[in-house]
Amino acid sequence: MYTERSVELKSDFYSRYGSASGTLYFERVGLPFMLMRGGSRMLAFAADCGVRAYGRRYGDVLRVLDSDSNVCDVRFCGGGGGAQILYKTDLSGFGREEETIAYTVDKLLVRMGIKKSIDVSNKRAAALCDEFGSRGWCAYLGRGGAKSLPLPLADHNVMMIRVRKNGGRKVNETDLECFEEGEDRRIEAAAAGLKDCRPEVLFEMMNESERAAEKLLGVSAQARRAAEIAMDTDGVCAARICESGVLCISEREKTDSAAHMIREEFGKQVGYYTGIAVIK
């Protein structure tokens, strides 16, 4: 994806590393977000926001630099296996940012021919969503492995509501098992709906998942309140607490007004104004 922001990053690369000859490579990976996750099933997608990186081969030293930082990760590689890399995270504080950065850099090194393959052992969500859940698709992970399913949200946006505290009480094993078993069934139902391009089934299952999480899991009062406010807001089709905050799906034409109403109501009830970002 070659956007205006990517052009700015390219200019930043040359200002930091110079414009000496050499092929410049580009890579982009969307931040992974979970729609639903159970004991043996998962639905996830790669957001429109993510990590962008430019790089070129350079001698024996690998320099990886965050565009917002003056600190380099410098490693000696040897045999001409070095590179200059500059990356930028579109949205900080949401999703699996560090995992996505590491995966993006590895993809760039493979593209440049410095690495032969990507080690995805500690980058599973980023790799899974990049391969199966980007650009109008979501990644479904079940007993048979991972595959892509349609994610027909052309008329919708996905928002993340950030709360200061997601977790509450400690969850006992029985409640967790009960939730995960129910979640696996809900994910199967949502996946069947997505196969038929019926996103309303996904919305219904996400809302059921939220009610089950509030009953069985240790969610915080803040997260519970954010989800409740979101589901009561005009234009919001689904809301579910996740590890990054509260994930909401809203009608596209009502996204701006919904975000404003959620932020204002949450501020009145909880005492601080939450951050809201449109991620898809």
Image (tube, rainbow, N blue to C red):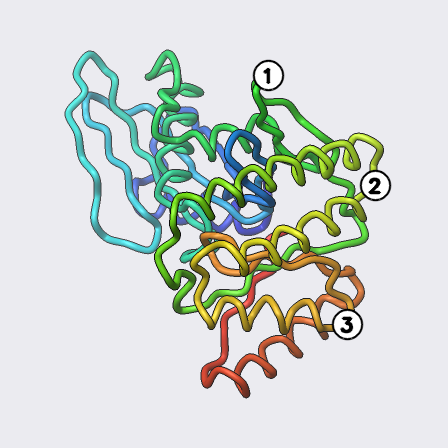
Residue linked to disc 1: 144
Contact? badges 2 and 1 (CB < 8 Å): no
In three-dimensional space, the C-alpha distance between marks 2 and 1, rounded to whole angstroms, equals 23 Å
User: Tag 3 or tag 2, which sits nearer the N-term?
Assistant: 2
User: Tag 3 or tag 1, which sits nearer the N-term?
Assistant: 1
Which amino acid does the dot numbered 3 rest on? Asp
Q: Quadrant of the N terminus?
A: top right
The residue depicted at 48 percent of the width and 40 percent of the height is 177
Residue at disc 2, secondary structure: loop
The dot on residue 234 is: 3
Position of 95 with respect to 80 (left or right) is right
Residue linked to disc 2: 198
Q: Is residue 95 above or below residue 53?
A: below
Image x and y of residue 68, in percent:
33, 55
| CA neighbours of label 2 inside 10 A, class few (<14), some (14 to 19), many (20+) | some
Q: Nearer the viewer, mark 1 or mark 3?
A: 1
Which amino acid does the dot numbered 1 rest on? Gly
The answer to which quarter of the image holds residue 266 is: bottom right
User: Tag 1 or tag 2, which sits nearer the N-term?
Assistant: 1
Which amino acid does the dot numbered 2 rest on? Arg
The residue depicted at 50 percent of the width and 74 percent of the height is 274
Q: Is residue 188 above or below residue 263?
A: above
